[in-house]
Image (spheres, rainbow, N blue to C red):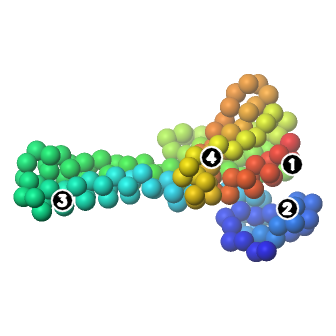
Amino acid sequence: METNADFVLENNAETNSGLILEKYEARNQGVPLFYPHWSIFIPTISILLVYTLCWILLSFLGMSHYNLGRLFIIIMAVFVPLMAAYAFLKFQTIRLQINDNSIYCHLGWPKELPLEISFSKIDKVSVNKSLSAKLFDQADILLKLKSGDEVVIANIAKPELARKIISESI
């Protein structure tokens, strides 16, 4: 079974448990690399649609020039672009790379520095799925460290596969 994926595994049964995945070795040297899912933009799109439809309704009722109509325009003109910029920056900066001895992850903007976590420091790996995460095959990956700390890598596509690879590597 072939899968279009944004990650890479060596193509052998021990590494990928029978899955045959598309390789991008020239891009990331055969290292599993997971990216965020596009569903990170859904809240922004939802707010834009709801406020636009409400403003259109007010326009048909002849009330778009009242304070409520002005509030909708301000939200669409200021708040929605800020949310879109935030989602875009998160989408561009969230990464999870699984190396031979460690995990290299960037938790996304506004976090500045990426983390490198050795497999020997990881106690447990779990996946937190919300309702929308189940619909879009994306979730948060929770790494519980032996020190008691937790690292959450949000909105990763193919989270079950990432969890399985990390669990096998621990």
Amino acid residing under circle 3: Leu
Query: Nearer the N terminus, badge 1 or badge 2?
Result: 2
Asked if disc 1 and disc 4 are in contact, CB closer than 8 Å, the reply is no
Secondary structure, mark 2, is helix
Query: Nearer the N terminus, badge 3 or badge 1?
Result: 3
- Residue 116 drawn at (x, y percent): 72, 41
Rendered residue at 20%/50% (across/down): 72
* Mark carried by residue 57: 3
Quadrant of the image for the C terminus?
A: top right
* Mark carried by residue 168: 1
Q: Quadrant of residue 23?
A: bottom right
Mark pair 4, 3: CA separation: 35 Å
Going by the image, does 22 lie left or right of 82? Answer: right
Mark pair 2, 4: CA separation: 23 Å
Rendered residue at 61%/54% (across/down): 134
Query: Nearer the N terminus, badge 1 or badge 4?
Result: 4
Secondary structure, mark 1, is helix
Q: Nearer the viewer, mark 4 or mark 3?
A: 3
Mark pair 1, 4: CA separation: 21 Å
Quadrant of the image for the N terminus?
A: bottom right
Asked if disc 3 and disc 2 are in contact, CB closer than 8 Å, the reply is no
Residue bearing the label numbered 2: 16
Asked if disc 3 and disc 1 are in contact, CB closer than 8 Å, the reply is no
Q: Is residue 54 visible?
A: yes
- Total numbered badges shown on the rendered structure: 4
Q: Residues within 10 Å of mark 1 (few under 14, many from 20)?
A: few
Rendered residue at 8%/48% (across/down): 66
Secondary structure, mark 3, is helix
Going by the image, does 75 lie left or right of 36? Answer: left
* Mark carried by residue 129: 4
